[in-house]
Image (cartoon, rainbow, N blue to C red):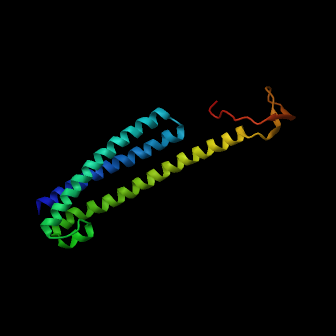
Amino acid sequence: MRPAARRLAAGLERCIALQERLVEMASAQRASLVGGLHDSIDASVRAAEATVLELSVAEAERQTAAEELADELGVAATRWSALRPALSPAERDLLGPLVDRVETVVRDLELANAINSQVVMRELDLVDVQIRGLSSSEAPRVTRGYSGDGSATVGQGAAAMLLNTSA
């Protein structure tokens, strides 16, 4: 087995580990987003940024190993589809599952990020609706409410107010 194939396998394994860490971070971050835990969100963003920087270094090393392997094989491209036919069966057996795993983890990360993005967008939409409702010069008038003793009141005509849902 070529040393460049082993270096490429090691590079793929490192990239997979970092991408899996990012998937875990995105999943953990979702609970903080839903709970509005701003300090936790800030900490997770900083940790994710550090991991992304680490991943960029690992990806550069993986690319270098792929280029070395392509040069040894006399292949013009470093894509898996170009390298695979020129590899020995043992090299294909080593690298094939790793390439498949990278593709799966990338899809998992894209999904986790898309879900988190939707959570953030829903929260922003909710804030937008609330701000528009409160800032409208023609705020809807409340004609039914409840007094302090819990009895219903009708016809008070008070302006609508934003409720504190965490109280």
Say whether residue 57 is left or right of residue 39.
left
Give above or below for 23 relative to 9.
Answer: above
- Left or right: residue 40 versus residue 65 is right
- Can residue 58 be seen here? The reply is yes
Quadrant of the rendered image containing residue 46: top left
55 relative position to 166: left or right: left
Q: Is residue 153 left or right of residue 67?
A: right
Which residue: 45% across, 51% down? 113
Farthest residue toward the right?
A: 155
Give residue 65's position: percent from left, percent from top: 18, 58
Q: Is residue 157 above or below residue 125?
A: above
Q: Quadrant of the N terminus?
A: bottom left
Answer whether residue 154 is visible to the viewer in this image: no
On the image, the x and y values in percent for residue 18 come to 30, 48
Quadrant of the frame with the C terminus: top right
Q: Residue furthest front?
A: 137
Vertical order, 72 against 146 (above or below): below
Residue 12: where, in percent of width, then height? 25, 56
Residue 150 position, x and y percent, is: 79, 30
- Residue at 29 percent of width and 53 percent of height: 16
Instruction: Point out the residue furthest to the top here.
Output: 148
* Residue at the image point whose x is 11% and y is 62% from the top: 2
- Counting every numbered tag in the picture gives 0
